[in-house]
Amino acid sequence: MGHVTKIETVPTDAGEARITWHTAPRARRVLALGHGAGGGIEARDLAALAAALPDRGVTVALVEQPWRVAGKKVAPAPKTLDTGWRGLWPALAAPGLPVVAGGRSAGARVACRTGAELGAAAVLALSFPLHPPGKPESSRAAELLGTGLPTLVVQGGNDPFGRPEEFPAGGAYELVEIPYGDHGFAVAKRAPVGQDEAVGRIVASVAEWLAALR
């Protein structure tokens, strides 16, 4: 089965956003994925999920924030990112399916902050930036702990923005570690886990979690 890809431009109060739809033939839900502050929807984890999940009944919507669409190099303040995400949410909900809010890094923070108010079914946080590198005292754990929704964190074992063991215990979220992965889930050539295996683990973990959602 092949999925259908289409690109939609959506006006928001932060500027024009863009959604690249990877539509499942018989979709049961939509997974909306925002990118990080240092890259776009071509990130390896986002691309892999968009390629694999439609055949499993999940439509994947890759969301480009207005600053990326406008060609800017630097992400705006979190409040502006939230404004863009809120503005395109009606387009994500338009298919009439449950929408899982997700993203990587800065996009994961947006999903955590806004998921409940927008009516998301759950939150997927890829490479959640628990703290700036080398500054564990500047924790963003409250955003993750405050989603109020079923939440899955997928985190690289060597992520300088927060290794899995740094995450607070007892939170109402699940955490999957991608061994040896950095913030972009890249693994060193000398690692005992190959790059394809690492990406495969991301896809399998997310697919299993989505399938178990009510």
Image (cartoon, grey):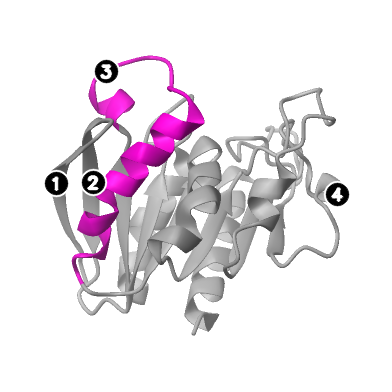
Kind of element beneath mark 3: loop
**Res. 156 in view:** no
Q: Disc 3 designates what residue?
A: 71
Label 2 crowding class (10 Å Cα cut-off): few <14, some 14-19, many 20+? many
The single residue placed furthest to the bottom in the displayed view is 214
Kind of residue indicated by mark 2: Ile
Q: Position of residue 141 (x, y in %)?
A: 73, 46
Distance, label 4 to label 1, CA atoms, is 39 Å
Separation (CA) of disc 2 from disc 1:
5 Å
Say which amino acid is labelled 3. Answer: Gly
First in sequence, mark 4 or 1: give its number. Answer: 1
Q: Main secondary structure of the magenta part?
A: helix
Mark 1 residue type: Glu
Mark found first going from the N terminus, 2 or 4: 2
- N-terminal of the two: label 3 or label 4? 3
Label 2: element kind = strand
| Cα separation between marks 3 and 2 | 15 Å
Q: Which residue is label 2 attached to?
A: 19
* Residue bearing mark 4: 165
Residue placed most toward the observer, 195 or 167: 167
Secondary structure of residue under mark 4: helix
Residue 68 belongs to the span the image colors magenta: yes
Please give the residue where the numbered disc 1 appears in the rendered image: 8
Give the Cα distance between marks 3 and 4.
Answer: 36 Å
Magenta span: 66-95
Asked if the residues shown at circle 3 and circle 4 are in contact, with their CB atoms under 8 angstroms apart, the answer is no
- In this rendering, the answer to whether 97 lies above or below 30 is below
Q: Position of residue 49 (x, y in %)?
A: 42, 56
Marks 1 & 3, CB-CB < 8 Å contact? no
Task: Tell me which label, 3 or 2, sits earlier in the chain.
Answer: 2
